[in-house]
C-alpha cells in the first residue's frame, strides 16, 4: 500500500484544530435537507483513550462544537465517521448519535467476531456503515475485506474506504465483488496533480460507474493550492459525470492531520459552485443522494 504523508510532525505531536468560526458558503444557498456526510467527534484521555499506533494526535472535537459547525454551515443532517485515533472504541460517536437520533447517522470501525449484540447496538444507535481505513493507524485493514462485506450485508450496512486511489488497479476487483455498496472517501485521497488520466483515478471512475459511491470531500488533502484547490476540480467533475446519483459531500471537519492551510467549511462548500454549477446537481449531491445512502428523510427540489 502507498504510505500517506500526514505532515512534518511526530505522530504524538498535537496537530492543529479547525477554524473556530465556521460559516456557510457565499456562492450559493445551502438547500433544506442538506447533509454533511463526513465529520468526526474526538475525545481526549483518560475518558476517551487514543490508540498507541495512531498516525497523529488531534485536539478535542466535542459534540457541541460539531453541532455548532452543522448549524453555522446550514446543514440539516450530519454523518459522523469513527476517527482513526479512537480505533474500534466507538463510544463517543455512539453517544453523540444517541443524543440526536433524528439528525445524525454514523459510520463505525468495528472488529470482526464480536457478539451480535454489539453490532445490533451500533445499528440501533444510527450506524449505517463500517469503515476500512488503510491510510492512518487505528483503522482496520483490507485483509478481512470479504468478511467485512458479509458482516455489512447481514446488518444492511455499506462499507466505506479510506484508501489511496493509486492502489486501486490492484484492489478494484475485490471491491467490485462486495455484496454491499462501497463508499470511497475524499475522491480516493488521490493527489490531484497526478491528473484524471492516472490509472488509479481511472480505476476509481470505473468503480463509481459500476455502482460505488464517492465523497466529494477532502480537496485540501489532494491539493496545496488553497483556498480554491483548482487542481481538484477536474477530479470532482469527472466523478460527477461518472455517477451524479452516487456522489455526496462531506466537510471532513475538524480537518485532522492537516499541517497546511486550515480550510473553513464554508470555503469547502463554495467549491461545489465550480464542481457542480447546476443547482439541481448540487441538490442531488447535498440532499437527495445522501438521503438515499444514509436513510434521511428525502427532500426533493433543485
Image (cartoon, rainbow, N blue to C red):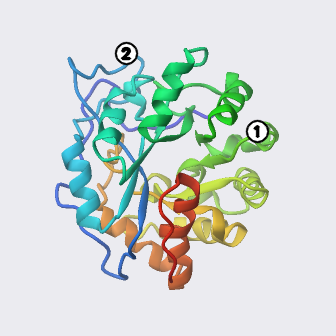
Kindly indicate whether the residue at mark 1 contacts the one at mark 2 (C-beta within 8 angstroms). Answer: no
- Let me know if residue 172 appears in the view: yes
Image x and y of residue 40, in percent: 35, 42
- Dot in front, 2 or 1: 1
Which residue is at a point 59% across and 51% down the rendered structure image?
Answer: 190
Q: Is residue 200 above or below residue 85?
A: below
Dot 1 falls on a residue whose secondary structure is: loop
Q: Residues within 10 Å of mark 2 (few under 14, many from 20)?
A: few
Q: Compare residues 94 and 163 and report the one nearer the observer.
A: 94
Image x and y of residue 46, in percent: 20, 17
Number of callouts: 2
Which residue is at a point 32% across and 45% down the rendered structure image?
Answer: 259
Q: CA distance from mark 2 to mark 1?
A: 31 Å
Q: Is residue 114 above or below residue 146?
A: above
Which residue is labeled 2 in the image? 52
Which residue is labeled 1 in the image? 178
Q: Compare residues 82 and 100 and report the one nearer the observer.
A: 100
Which residue is at a point 48% across and 68% down the rendered structure image?
Answer: 286
Name the quadrant containing residue 168: top right
Amino acid at each position: 500500500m502507498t504510505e500517506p504523508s500526514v505532515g512534518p510532525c511526530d505522530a504524538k505531536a498535537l496537530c492543529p484544530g479547525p477554524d473556530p468560526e465556521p460559516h456557510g458558503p457565499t456562492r450559493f444557498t445551502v438547500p433544506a435537507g442538506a447533509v454533511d456526510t463526513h465529520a468526526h467527534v474526538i475525545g481526549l484521555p483518560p475518558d476517551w483513550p487514543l490508540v498507541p499506533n495512531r498516525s497523529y494526535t488531534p485536539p478535542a472535537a466535542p459534540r457541541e462544537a460539531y453541532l455548532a459547525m452543522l448549524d453555522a454551515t446550514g446543514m440539516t443532517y450530519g454523518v459522523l465517521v469513527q476517527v482513526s485515533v479512537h480505533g474500534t472504541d466507538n463510544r463517543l460517536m455512539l453517544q453523540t448519535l444517541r443524543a440526536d437520533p433524528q439528525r445524525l447517522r454514523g459510520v463505525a470501525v468495528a472488529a470482526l467476531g464480536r457478539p451480535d449484540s454489539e453490532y445490533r447496538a451500533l445499528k440501533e444507535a444510527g450506524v449505517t456503515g463500517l469503515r476500512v481505513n488503510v491510510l492512518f493507524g487505528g483503522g482496520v485493514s483490507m485483509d478481512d475485506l470479504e468478511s467485512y462485506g458479509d458482516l455489512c450485508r447481514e446488518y444492511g450496512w455499506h462499507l466505506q474506504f479510506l484508501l489511496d486511489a493509486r492502489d486501486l488497479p490492484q484492489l478494484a476487483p475485490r471491491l467490485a465483488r462486495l455484496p454491499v455498496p462501497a463508499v470511497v472517501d475524499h475522491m480516493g485521497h488521490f493527489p490531484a496533480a497526478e491528473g484524471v488520466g492516472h490509472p488509479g483515478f481511472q480505476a476509481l471512475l470505473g468503480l463509481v460507474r459500476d455502482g460505488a459511491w464517492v465523497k466529494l470531500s477532502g480537496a485540501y488533502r489532494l491539493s496545496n493550492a488553497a483556498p480554491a484547490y483548482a487542481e481538484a476540480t477536474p477530479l470532482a467533475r469527472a466523478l460527477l459525470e461518472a455517477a451524479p446519483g452516487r456522489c455526496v459531500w462531506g466537510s471532513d471537519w475538524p480537518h485532522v492531520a492537516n499541517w497546511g492551510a486550515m480550510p473553513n467549511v464554508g470555503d469547502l462548500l463554495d467549491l461545489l459552485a465550480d464542481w457542480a454549477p447546476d443547482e439541481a446537481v448540487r441538490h442531488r449531491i447535498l440532499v437527495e443522494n445522501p438521503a438515499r445512502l444514509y436513510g434521511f428523510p428525502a427532500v426533493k427540489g433543485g
